[in-house]
Image (spheres, helix red, strand yellow):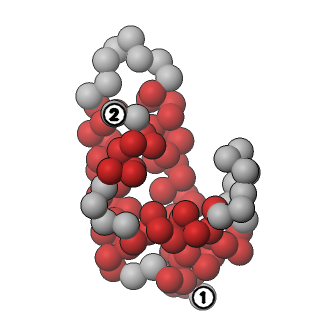
């Protein structure tokens, strides 16, 4: 299962809906602007934090299950993990601190 499909297949939609809304109108190669990420952080509560943790756990499990010959998927999963750790959780912490 690809990273994109994994994230899309999760039942809870809280934080993913916020991210989709923040990415609206952007090209796939564009990063979500800082002000939009900060807005996500301000709207996140306990259920969104639980969503992020579940996503990170699932990505870790998917990465562990990859065959040794697969060289691209670990990098893709790593980018997704980095996004959720730095962009989502980092902005959430910053928003809660202010």
Residues under numbered marks 1 and 2 in contact, where contact means CB atoms less than 8 Å apart? no
Q: Residues within 10 Å of mark 2 (few under 14, many from 20)?
A: few
Q: How many marks on residues?
A: 2
Label 2 residue SS: loop
Q: Is residue 28 visible?
A: yes
In percent of the image, x 32 and y 76: which residue is there? 47
| Residue 1 tag number | 2
Q: Quadrant of the N terminus?
A: top left
In percent of the image, x 45 and y 63: which residue is there? 16
Please tell me which residue lies in front, 17 or 86: 17
Q: Residues within 10 Å of mark 1 (few under 14, many from 20)?
A: few
- Residue lying at the far top of the rendered structure: 69
Q: Residue under circle 1?
A: 98
In percent of the image, x 39 and y 51: which residue is there? 8
Label 1 residue SS: loop
43 is higher (above) or lower (below) than 24: below
């Amino acid at each position: 299962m690809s990273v994109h499909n994994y994230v899309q297949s999760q039942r809870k939609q809280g934080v993913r809906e916020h991210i989709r809304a923040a990415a609206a109108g952007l090209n796939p190669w564009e990063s979500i602007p800082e002000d939009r990420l900060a807005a996500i952080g301000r709207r996140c509560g306990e259920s969104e934090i639980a969503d992020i943790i579940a996503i990170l756990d699932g990505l870790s499990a998917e990465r562990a299950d990859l065959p040794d010959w697969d060289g691209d998927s670990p990098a893709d999963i790593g980018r997704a993990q980095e996004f959720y750790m730095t962009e989502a959780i980092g902005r959430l912490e910053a928003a809660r601190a202010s």
